[in-house]
Image (cartoon, helix red, strand yellow):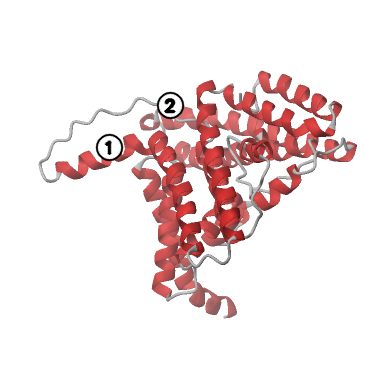
Amino acid sequence: MSFNSSDFLIFFPIVVLIYFLIPQKLKNYWLLIASYYFYMCWNAKYALIILFSTIVTYLSGLALDTLQQRSADPLITRKKKIVVAISVLLNLSLLFYFKYINFAIGILGNALSVFHIQLNLPSVDILLPVGISFYTFQALGYTIDVYRGNTCAEKNFFQYALFVSFFPQLVAGPIERSSHLLQQLATPHKFNSDEAKSGLLLMLWGFFLKIVLADRIAIFVDWVYGDYHTFGGWYLIVATALFAIQIYCDFAGYSIIAMGAAQILGIRLMENFQSPYLAVSVADFWRRWHISLTSWFRDYLYIPLGGSRCSKWRKYMNKMIVFLVSGLWHGAKISFVVWGGLNGLYQIIGEILQPLRDKLVKL
């Protein structure tokens, strides 16, 4: 079910009411059941996918914890890397199959056609599981955090399963860190009227952005884009400007609803948007837009590649890789990869021109 559905307006009050009425020791079990029910409303069989990802990363965390206790073993670092590699490979293989298999088949077919080789592989008829990109990255972040020693391995499977499947941020983020969310889930919360009021106001603001603004703007944008040949230039300009507002209100609205719903339950999720359209540069924009994903790529891809602690050209290459992967994460189409590459290129050009801009400002 989606946040802006009548089903959620029935589901959420029931979850909250029961959560605060039942004993403390049952609260997280109730949230876990509610989270899986919430996800299964989209497609019941895909609950097996999130369960598989949960089991793999949970076991990898336990394995890493066991290896860390055997500090006398000279091969411990190598074994830990193998555990992380297996966890990453299994999770990304699952993500690849459901999200990118048809894209890969198309790319392979086009590449072979250059050499006049005909590839007659049929496309795979699969439905993309809702939120798979979000909870896969969240679970992988946990594995890497345990490997780095940034968080302790969670011994309680049900509590860890709740971390992966917590329903407010399950299907559209924000992508939470284990050190932030697991710690909050460790202690079930009592009802707090101030937190509930603040959370409800957040939810109302999110619903306003999503339903009143984004969904209304979408009507005009879809109308113009759907028949752009018959509209003049001004219509396209206005539709494009409104589309920028639409995607912000849609995505930010959903994230704000998630934050509000979690806060009513006594849990604080990270802020995902910070006035991105007030950014002063492309780099500043990406520090403000979809913060949980941007910071995820920074911590788990950009820094491992070498980050900025390398030569200037290698740093630029690292940024380009991150944005190409980010584009692919957003969608299994060449257009998304090109979009990611352009944003990476804009960042690099902006950094190269920064000294010149600073001099011009001083004039």
Please give left or right for residue 301 compared with residue 291 in the image.
left
Q: Is residue 33 above or below residue 96?
A: above
As drawn, the residue found furthest toward the right would be 193
Viewer-proximal residue, 210 or 197?
Answer: 197
Q: Are the residues flagged by discs 2 and 1 in contact, CB closer than 8 Å?
A: no
Task: Where is residue 359? Give x, y as percent.
Answer: 53, 79
The residue closer to the viewer here, 148 or 239, is: 148
Q: Residue 40: x and y, percent?
A: 58, 23
Between residues 129 and 50, which one lies in front from this camera angle? Answer: 50
Query: Tag 1: Cα neighbours inside 10 Å, few (<14), some, or many (≥20)?
Result: some
* Residue at image mark 1: 105
Q: Residue at x 60, y 50 (%)?
A: 292
Give the position of the C terminus as an image quadrant: bottom right
What amino acid is found at the position of numbered circle 2 in the picture? Leu
Q: Quick one: SS at disc 2?
A: loop
Image coordinates of residue 325 in percent, x first then y, are 42, 51
Residue type at the position of mark 1: Ile
In the picture of the structure, the residue carrying the numbered disc 2 is 127
Q: Position of residue 274 (x, y in %)?
A: 66, 52
On screen, residue 163 above or below 72: above
Q: Secondary structure at mark 1?
A: helix
Q: Nearer the viewer, residue 208 or 92?
A: 92
Q: Residue sitting at 24 percent across and 42 percent down?
A: 108
Rendering quarter of residue 212: top right
Report crowding for label 2: few under 14, some 14 to 19, many 20 or more residues within 10 A (C-alpha): few
User: For the view shown, which residue lies furthest in the front direction?
Assistant: 72
Quadrant in the rendering for residue 299:
bottom right
* Position of 41 relative to 111 (above/below): above
**Outermost residue, left direction?**
116
